[in-house]
Image: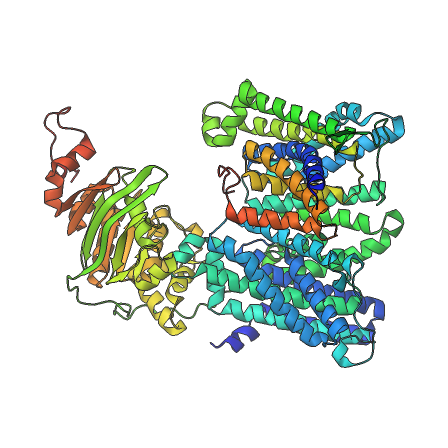
């Protein structure tokens, strides 16, 4: 294991981790505002990725441009999911919420299998395989673009939450829903908008990921688990923790698969997750809620 | 009533009889295809019942039962193919391995009392660790999987030609698991499970070692899941990591148990009974339209519908036909024949010191909730604790009762150091407590609650006698069979006291048991506290109701901002200038502050 290989793994992991960070931040935001841990988050992401693939294969639309078209569709799906499922389990026990969203995850996954089959799907772009070298490290162009887009969106999201009127309401709801109601904030509609917004936002990582990765119907649950791990690792409801956790998981994933060229490698992420959780049950920064 | 007769009278026993009749009928009338489906059904019942022990009965939802299922499958097949060990033995080894693995996974979250969600995610992560680890081990076939030995060589290979043999074996394993669970449930564990499920803090406060119960239950559950894994591997004739460790197993389990009714004894039987044949029908009927994925889609939708529309599952839907979630076995609680409940109480209040707290402090971050408090309590006395809100009264109780560990200082009870002991050990040492915000066991009846508290560490006969006399002492007889969740606030408070008394404490901690009661109910509560003391039980109580504190207390201590500011007989404390200041503000601002006992509304 040379230093160069390690450096390569860290850089690739960091680039991928940037996208994970955005996925995780939107999940953490949903949890923070609604206290619902959405086990179907990755499946909604996957639905977006299928949207990107369809637009690319049918109309030749570039995955980055397709983001703009997929986002409203995801928003509609988000509205339906909110009103049919999520609204009914707000305030219910965390396990009931977990089971309902796990059922949704299963339903999305089998719908994808039914419609698109089990084949690997990908998109064609002019950037396929494009890469450049910096100090001996290979950087894929689509990976870099995805990373940059995600970081910019993460920053914009943070600004939105910290500096706008809606962001202030959102933080009030996250901190104390009862108090927020008493202050005249329409809590339910804030929660609905956050859920729908976060679902629509998944179009961004969907486009970024599709530009360089492949898609099967089981990708959804894997992204769900990955983002759940990141969010729990970062501290439930802690956005900064989710961002840093996303970067870390990306790096751990890349480094372990570089270190151990073996099918067992992905297991190490789960092992690291378990150990980290035991060491810091309230998250990386110790600011998460106990759920 | 011994455990055998309890078992034969249970609904589980009836279900098992029905199952064996069905097995007999199937063996005679059905062909291999349908028998195969029935074997699969029984396997799912076994697995769902094992999951339900922790996920339903105990309320700790495991998302990682596929880990145990897979361990059972891989251990038996590996031992058989690589070392020629009989899968019958392999099943036992796999079960023990799974039980050990479950205890490793469960130890820290249970020990630290982490949230159930963290437990769920840890179990899920553990199943993925095994999934990938096994994929990476060539000796276990890697991602290609393993085949058990060929069919039909010896009974010891657990590979049969006849589908009926598998059916009989599946029936035997399912009977073993369901009967074990039923027997455990109708013994004392049933009470412990329901108590932990309903309120873990209160379960600890009545002396239940919650961590030990959870770990034991998780281990037994893992053992049964591994048994199902071994059986399934032998029956299917092929295993690979995805098919036995995959998350699909866990999702099916959740679906079957939730649709059947998680937390009930027969839910895990009913869920698969309806869904497995339905799924099989859909799979074949929809073969042209995408087969298995269509039937998965319907399963996913069914899971959501079941949780949203029928939270109690099929079992609660069938309640009108007499199906229960599983009856606990409460013996006849004889009303007291005048005598007080027995026990390790010193009947004569001899006035020696039984509890000493020396320089006890507790801080959260930089905030001292309790600072350098020292108290002595003599046996047989009634000690009142008063102080403004936020003075640290409840924190002091939590330190005494073990739900918090002091930052510094020592607490001795009967000459024994108890600071930092877990709540159940403090309860067993002889300190009972109530909770300021009542923590009933909502699904237990009043009688079941009191009996459960008396049962910890005692024989059933003793527990029944104690529960009977506590129920009549606290005048709860008429509410015996009501659910704890359904009684009025005053009755809930009495139930809290009864639950604490049933643990036969020598010292009882009562936390604001009069808050929100009417004047008449307060008079009753005062009488009740006196009669508790007359039993020889030392009483420490926190109360804001000054009339009650003055009337009851032999001594009073006053806390303010975490510090002990006064101590003495009621009339002295009421005139103590620092106490008056803490309650009414500084005399300088308000010239003639009257002493507290003149302020009170007589």
Q: Which residue lies furthest to the top in this view?
A: A164
Judge whether residue B189 can be spotted in this image.
yes
Of B110 and B504, which appears nearest the observer?
A: B110
Of B494 and B60, which appears nearest the observer?
A: B60
Image quadrant where one finds the C terminus of chain B: top left
Q: Is residue A23 above or below residue B487?
A: above
Q: Which residue lies furthest to the bottom in this view?
A: B154
Of A226 and B580, which appears nearest the observer?
A: A226
Q: In which quarter of the image is residue B81?
A: bottom right
Q: In this view, does B357 lie to the left or right of B294?
A: left
Q: In which quarter of the image is residue B265?
A: bottom right
Q: Point out residue B45 in the picture as x, y percentages from the top left corner.
A: 68, 64
Q: Residue at the spot x=34%, y=51% of the render?
A: B493
Q: Point out residue B577 in the picture as x, y percentages from the top left corner.
A: 12, 35
Judge whether residue B476 can be spotted in this image.
no
**Label total for image:** 0
Q: Point out residue A230 in the picture as x, y percentages from the top left corner.
A: 61, 40
Q: Is residue A167 above or below residue B131?
A: above
Q: In this view, does B337 lie to the left or right of B63?
A: left
Indicate the colouring scheme.
rainbow
Q: Point out residue A53 in the picture as x, y percentages from the top left corner.
A: 83, 33
């Amino acid at each position: 294991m040379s230093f160069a290989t390690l450096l390569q793994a860290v850089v690739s992991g960091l680039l991928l981790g940037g996208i994970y960070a955005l996925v995780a931040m939107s999940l953490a935001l949903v949890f923070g505002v609604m206290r619902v841990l959405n086990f179907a988050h990755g499946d909604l992401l996957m639905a977006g990725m299928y949207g990107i693939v369809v637009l690319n294969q049918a109309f030749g639309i570039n995955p980055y441009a397709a983001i703009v078209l997929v986002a409203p569709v995801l928003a509609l799906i988000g509205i339906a999911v909110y009103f049919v499922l999520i609204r009914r389990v707000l305030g219910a026990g965390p396990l009931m919420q977990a089971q309902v969203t796990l059922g949704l995850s299963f339903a999305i996954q089998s719908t994808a299998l039914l419609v698109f089959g089990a084949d690997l799907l990908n998109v064609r772009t002019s950037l396929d395989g494009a890469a450049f070298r910096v100090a001996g490290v290979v950087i894929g162009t689509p990976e870099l673009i995805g990373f940059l887009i995600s970081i910019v969106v993460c920053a914009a999201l943070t600004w939105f939450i910290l500096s706008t009127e809606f962001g202030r309401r959102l933080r009030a709801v996250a901190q104390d829903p009862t108090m927020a109601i008493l202050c005249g904030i329409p809590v339910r509609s804030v929660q609905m908008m956050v859920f729908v917004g976060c679902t629509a936002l998944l179009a961004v990582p969907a486009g970024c990921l599709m530009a360089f990765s492949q898609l099967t119907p089981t990708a959804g649950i894997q992204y769900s688990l990955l983002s759940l791990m990141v969010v729990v690792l970062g501290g439930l409801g802690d956005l900064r923790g989710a961002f840093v956790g996303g970067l870390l998981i990306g790096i751990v994933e890349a480094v372990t698969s570089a270190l151990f060229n073996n099918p067992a490698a992905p297991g190490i992420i789960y092992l690291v997750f378990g150990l980290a959780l035991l060491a810091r049950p309230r998250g990386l920064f110790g600011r998460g809620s106990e759920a | 009533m011994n455990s055998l007769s309890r078992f034969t009278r249970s609904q589980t026993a009836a279900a098992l009889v029905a199952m064996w009749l069905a097995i007999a009928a199937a063996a005679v009338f059905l062909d291999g295809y349908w028998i195969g489906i029935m074997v699969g059904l029984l396997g799912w019942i076994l697995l769902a019942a094992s999951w339900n022990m922790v996920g339903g009965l105990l309320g700790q939802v495991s998302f990682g039962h596929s880990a145990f299922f897979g361990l059972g499958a891989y251990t038996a097949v590996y031992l058989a193919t690589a070392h020629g060990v009989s899968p019958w033995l392999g099943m036992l080894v796999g079960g023990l391995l799974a039980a050990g693995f479950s205890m490793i996974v469960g130890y820290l979250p249970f020990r630290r009392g982490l949230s159930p969600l963290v437990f769920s995610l840890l179990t899920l992560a553990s199943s993925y660790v095994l999934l990938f680890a096994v994929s990476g081990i060539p000796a276990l076939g890697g991602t290609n999987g393993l085949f058990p030995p060929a069919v039909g060589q010896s009974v010891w290979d657990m590979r049969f030609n006849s589908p009926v043999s598998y059916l009989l074996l599946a029936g035997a394993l399912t009977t073993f698991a369901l009967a074990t669970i039923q027997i455990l449930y109708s013994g004392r564990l049933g009470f412990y499970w329901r108590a932990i499920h309903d309120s873990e803090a209160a379960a600890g406060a009545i002396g239940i070692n919650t961590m030990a119960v959870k770990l034991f239950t998780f281990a037994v559950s893992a053992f049964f899941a591994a048994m199902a894994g071994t059986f399934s591997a032998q029956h299917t004739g092929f295993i690979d990591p995805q098919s036995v460790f995959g998350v699909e197993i866990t999702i099916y389990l959740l679906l079957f148990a939730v649709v059947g009714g998680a937390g009930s004894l027969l839910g895990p039987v009913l869920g698969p009974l309806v869904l497995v044949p339905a799924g099989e029908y859909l799979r074949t009927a929809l073969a042209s339209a995408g087969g298995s994925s269509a039937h998965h889609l319907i399963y996913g939708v069914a899971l959501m519908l079941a949780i949203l529309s029928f939270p109690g599952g099929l079992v609660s839907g069938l309640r009108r036909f007499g199906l229960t979630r599983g009856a606990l076995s409460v013996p006849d609680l004889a009303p007291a024949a005048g005598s007080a409940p027995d026990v390790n109480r010193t009947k004569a209040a001899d006035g020696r010191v039984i509890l000493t707290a020396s320089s006890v402090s507790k801080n959260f971050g930089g905030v001292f909730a309790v600072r350098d408090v020292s108290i002595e309590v003599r046996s047989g006395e009634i000690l009142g604790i008063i102080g403004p809100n936020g003075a640290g009264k409840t924190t002091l109780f939590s330190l005494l009762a073990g739900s918090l560990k002091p930052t510094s200082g020592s607490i001795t009870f009967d000459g024994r150091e108890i600071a930092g002991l877990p709540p159940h050990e403090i309860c067993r040492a002889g300190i009972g407590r109530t909770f300021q915000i009542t923590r009933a066991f909502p699904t237990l009846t009043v009688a079941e609650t009191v009996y459960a508290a008396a049962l910890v560490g005692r024989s059933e006969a003793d527990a029944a006698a104690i529960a009977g006399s506590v129920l009549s002492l606290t005048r709860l007889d008429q509410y015996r069979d009501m659910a704890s969740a359904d009684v009025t606030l005053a009755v809930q408070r009495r139930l809290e006291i009864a639950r604490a008394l049933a643990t036969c404490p020598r010292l009882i901690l009562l936390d604001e048991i009069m808050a929100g009661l009417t004047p008449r109910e307060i008079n009753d509560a005062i009488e009740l506290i006196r009669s508790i003391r007359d039993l020889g039980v030392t009483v420490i109580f926190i109360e804001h109701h000054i009339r009650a504190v003055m009337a009851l207390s032999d001594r009073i201590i006053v806390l303010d901002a975490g510090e002990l500011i006064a101590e003495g007989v009621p009339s002295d404390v009421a005139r103590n200038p620092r106490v008056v200041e803490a309650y009414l503000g500084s005399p300088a601002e308000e010239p003639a502050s009257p002493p507290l006992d003149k302020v009170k509304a007589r």
